[in-house]
């Protein structure tokens, strides 16, 4: 009846591996990897076949609702704040991703019955049974068309057809995506590291917030046409600016007025003027040095002395007349004019020497360099100007030393325009530097940006950024192409599968659905009186399902009859067109409600025959009719039967030189509730291996021996009275099968524990009665459990069993995975 799945391939996994439940009904904070571990602390996954046991209200139905939310692709009503995550070989599914996943799941639970067979839930008012169709009589033409499409579809296992091609394209898509992602992430990581380690941590760049988004924006800035990389000198200047503090304004400006032209105009007539003595003294005319010596001596001797201060000889009586005729008034006037001109030139030389009193330290970093260059250039130009002045002065001094000999003057070589330019440049820098005080912070911000962009530019060049971007673009194009190819191939498969469903819909027959349910009821449960009949609707065009008993509409069905009809309906519905032909994950939640022992066995037989039992391939290997199977129950008898289900096997990869090894692919789990929260663990060995309530009750009592355990798990303490009563009834019945006084229900307890220990016996009797039977003292059910009292009784009972039969007690400890007691 079900699609046959191939046997597990090498290293294959179950479809659903694990489930984490942050919040869903009674499940709160379930972390699979922390709780579902074997004795070696190894995490265990769901297998192909999964058996789950839990007592009533432990959370079994809640767990089934999580699985059914995958089937219906929506959360059940009233599960506010639900949060869970399933992982499997087709990806993870969370509470937010129910609308899009690739798992085909069918769930039987209370909600399935309510949604599909509301008549069974409410037989009196408005309940209905939804109709469904299964494949009816075979049509050869349609069968051939379906078979042709199935051949076209092929499979991964057969390495042929669209499905195999899709797997190849999937691998290519994944490989190209991985290559693109790896390259993209690699470049992103380079950018992220540089942004974090080189720029964000460099305070010269000024920003404490800098990430990959910022560096990408900076890279874009360096690609603009107006971007120019900084030279080493420019970088140094920017760094100096960042260190610069606000400077006081520079007072004054540089002013210069070159006087050489006017001085030369005054000096030229003096230098070229010709004068002649009234009566020249030839010796003086021939010897200018002597003439100068005499001229200077006249000032020391006239009207002061009659002897020569040099030779001590008497001066001639006519010496002054002769000298006055040689040194005329005209020569005196010329000498005076020459002195005045020499003084003016000397003053100009002194003025030029002190012209530039500004220093580089008065300027900001960027202006300082320019100032120093202009200052040097001005000094050099003024040096030439000064030489021209000195040349003029020397010519004047030469004429003065020889008044009667004209002197020619060389042409000036300085460039007045150049000097004026340097002065103007310096004054401009003074103005600019003074203006920097108000714009300093803005300039620093601009400098930091410029330096950062220079850093980014150098980094981009070093990692060949453009080449990597181009490579990533090419990889993305390749990945997109592979993705499109995969999507197209996937669509082709969906179209083919939809065509198959359309063809099968032509074969379906709703009456066959009812007949299938009846066949299951009759063949497995022997119910031929109750049937599900397909009858014409009021419009003669539709069909409706109706339950009948002996040909008449049936009402007042028992709970057991409702359970049988509902489960047979579910099993038959697995043959409808929406399920047939798919690899299904099947979840069956406690299908044996209100059934007696015989019906429980038949329920097991139905599951074994139609689902669990594998078929055989031609090579003898197994092929399974389900992808994955979950069955949960609270009934120990049903659990005992479930142990007999056909165990699926899987092959493990063989080591070199060895044969492949087959291992079982099934697991047993326990659903427990501690207070308001449910949990999933591996099933204890006493339930997995022995499946008796006796072992379970012993374990619950053992859990209560330490009152500190109530802080972590107080559930066993709440159920202690009932568990103790049931355990002692079973244990003492086999201990004392003969009951002397049938009216004394306490007789076996007194025989085992002894008459002399009245206090302990009274305490046991109190817990036995008050905590396990509340009808006489209902207030006990509303009061906190007295934990010390329970721990005391638990230890007393355990000690008595140990003293009575150490071998049996240690065997019981082994059955619950506890070490033997050796005292």
Image (cartoon, grey):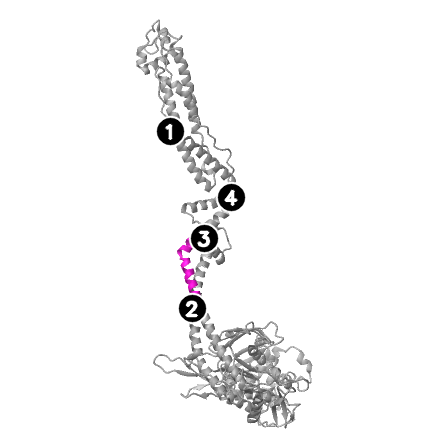
Q: Which mark is residue 117?
A: none
Q: Secondary structure at mark 3?
A: helix
Q: Is residue 797 above or below residue 361?
A: below
| Residue matched to label 2 | 176
* Earlier residue among tags 2 and 1: 2
| Residue matched to label 4 | 440
Our reading of the magenta stretch's main secondary structure is: helix
| Residue matched to label 3 | 222
Q: Secondary structure at mark 4?
A: helix
Q: Is residue 821 visible?
A: no
Q: Is residue 254 above or below residue 765?
A: above
* Percent x, y of residue 446: 49, 47
* Earlier residue among tags 3 and 1: 3
Q: Residue at point 52% right, 37% down?
A: 249
Q: Secondary structure at mark 1?
A: loop
* Percent x, y of residue 36: 51, 77
Q: Which residues are magenta?
A: 452-477
């Amino acid at each position: 009846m079900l699609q046959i799945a191939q046997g597990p391939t090498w290293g294959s996994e179950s479809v659903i591996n694990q489930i984490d439940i942050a919040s869903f009904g009674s499940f709160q904070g379930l972390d699979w990897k922390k709780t579902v571990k074997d004795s070696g602390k190894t995490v265990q996954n769901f297998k192909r076949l999964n058996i789950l046991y839990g007592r009533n209200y432990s959370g079994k139905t809640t767990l089934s609702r999580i699985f059914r939310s995958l089937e219906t692709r929506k959360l059940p009503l009233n599960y506010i704040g639900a949060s869970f995550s399933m992982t499997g070989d087709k990806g993870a599914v969370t509470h937010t991703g129910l609308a899009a996943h690739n798992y085909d799941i069918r769930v039987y639970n209370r909600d399935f019955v309510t949604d599909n067979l509301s008549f069974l839930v409410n037989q009196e008012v408005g309940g209905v049974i939804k109709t469904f169709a299964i494949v009816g009589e075979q049509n050869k033409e349609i069968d051939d068309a379906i078979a042709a499409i199935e051949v076209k579809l092929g499979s991964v296992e057969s390495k042929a057809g669209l499905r195999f091609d899709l797997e190849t394209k999937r691998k290519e898509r994944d490989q190209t995506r991985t290559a693109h992602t790896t390259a993209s992430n690699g470049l992103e990581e380079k950018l992220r590291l540089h942004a974090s380690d080189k720029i964000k941590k460099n305070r010269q760049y000024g920003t404490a917030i800098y990430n990959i988004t910022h560096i990408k924006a900076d890279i874009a800035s360096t690609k603009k046409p107006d971007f120019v990389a900084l030279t080493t000198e420019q970088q140094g200047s920017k760094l100096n600016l960042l260190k610069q503090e606000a400077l006081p304004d520079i007072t004054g400006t540089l002013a210069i007025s070159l006087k050489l032209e006017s001085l030369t105009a005054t000096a030229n007539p003096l230098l070229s003027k010709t004068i002649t003595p009234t009566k020249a003294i030839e010796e003086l005319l021939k010897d200018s040095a002597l003439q100068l010596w005499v001229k200077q001596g006249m000032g020391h001797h006239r009207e002061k002395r009659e002897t020569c201060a040099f030779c001590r000889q008497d001066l001639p009586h006519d010496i002054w007349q002769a000298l006055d005729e040689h040194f005329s008034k005209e020569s005196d006037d010329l000498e005076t004019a020459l002195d005045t001109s020499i003084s003016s030139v000397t003053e100009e030389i002194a003025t030029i020497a002190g012209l530039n009193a500004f220093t580089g330290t008065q300027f900001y970093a960027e202006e300082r360099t320019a100032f120093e260059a202009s200052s040097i250039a001005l000094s050099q130009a003024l040096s030439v100007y000064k030489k021209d002045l000195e040349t003029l002065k020397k010519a004047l001094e030469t004429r003065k030393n020889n008044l009667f000999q004209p002197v020619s003057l060389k042409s000036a070589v300085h460039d007045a325009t150049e000097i004026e330019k340097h002065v103007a440049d310096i004054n401009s820098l003074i103005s600019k530097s003074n203006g920097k005080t108000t714009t300093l912070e803005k300039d620093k911000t601009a400098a930091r940006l410029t330096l950062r962009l220079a850093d980014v530019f150098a980094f981009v060049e070093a990692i060949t950024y453009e080449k990597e971007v181009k490579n990533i673009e090419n990889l993305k194009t390749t990945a997109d192409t592979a993705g499109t190819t995969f999507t197209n191939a996937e669509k082709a498969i969906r179209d083919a599968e939809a065509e198959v469903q359309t063809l099968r819909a032509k074969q379906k027959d709703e009456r066959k659905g009812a007949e299938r349910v009846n066949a299951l009821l009759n063949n497995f449960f022997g119910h031929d009186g109750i049937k599900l009949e397909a009858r014409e609707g009021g419009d003669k065009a539709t069909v409706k399902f109706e339950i009948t008993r002996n040909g008449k509409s049936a009402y007042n069905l028992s709970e057991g009859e409702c359970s049988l009809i509902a489960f047979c309906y579910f099993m038959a519905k697995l043959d409808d067109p929406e399920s047939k032909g798919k690899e299904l994950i099947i979840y069956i939640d406690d299908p044996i409600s209100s059934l007696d022992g015989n019906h429980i066995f038949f329920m097991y037989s139905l599951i074994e025959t139609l689902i669990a039992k594998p078929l055989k391939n031609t090579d003898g290997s197994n092929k399974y009719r389900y992808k994955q199977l979950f069955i949960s129950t609270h009934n120990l008898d049903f659990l005992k039967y479930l142990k007999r289900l056909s165990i699926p096997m899987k092959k493990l990869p063989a080591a070199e030189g060895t044969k492949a090894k087959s291992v079982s692919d099934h697991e047993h789990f326990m659903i427990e509730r501690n207070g308001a929260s449910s949990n999933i663990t591996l099933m204890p060995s006493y339930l997995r291996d022995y499946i008796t309530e006796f072992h379970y009750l012993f374990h619950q009592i053992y859990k209560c021996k330490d009152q500190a355990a109530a802080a972590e798990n107080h559930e066993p303490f709440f159920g202690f009275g009932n568990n103790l009563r049931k355990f002692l009834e079973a244990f003492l019945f086999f201990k004392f099968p003969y009951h002397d006084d049938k009216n004394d229900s306490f007789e076996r307890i007194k025989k085992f524990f002894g008459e002399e220990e009245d206090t302990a016996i009274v305490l046991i009797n109190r817990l036995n009665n008050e905590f396990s039977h509340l009808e006489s003292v209902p207030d006990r059910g509303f009061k906190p459990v007295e934990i010390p009292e329970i721990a005391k009784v638990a230890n007393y009972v355990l000690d008595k069993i140990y003293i009575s039969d150490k071998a049996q007690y240690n065997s019981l400890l082994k059955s619950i995975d506890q070490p033997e007691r050796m005292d």
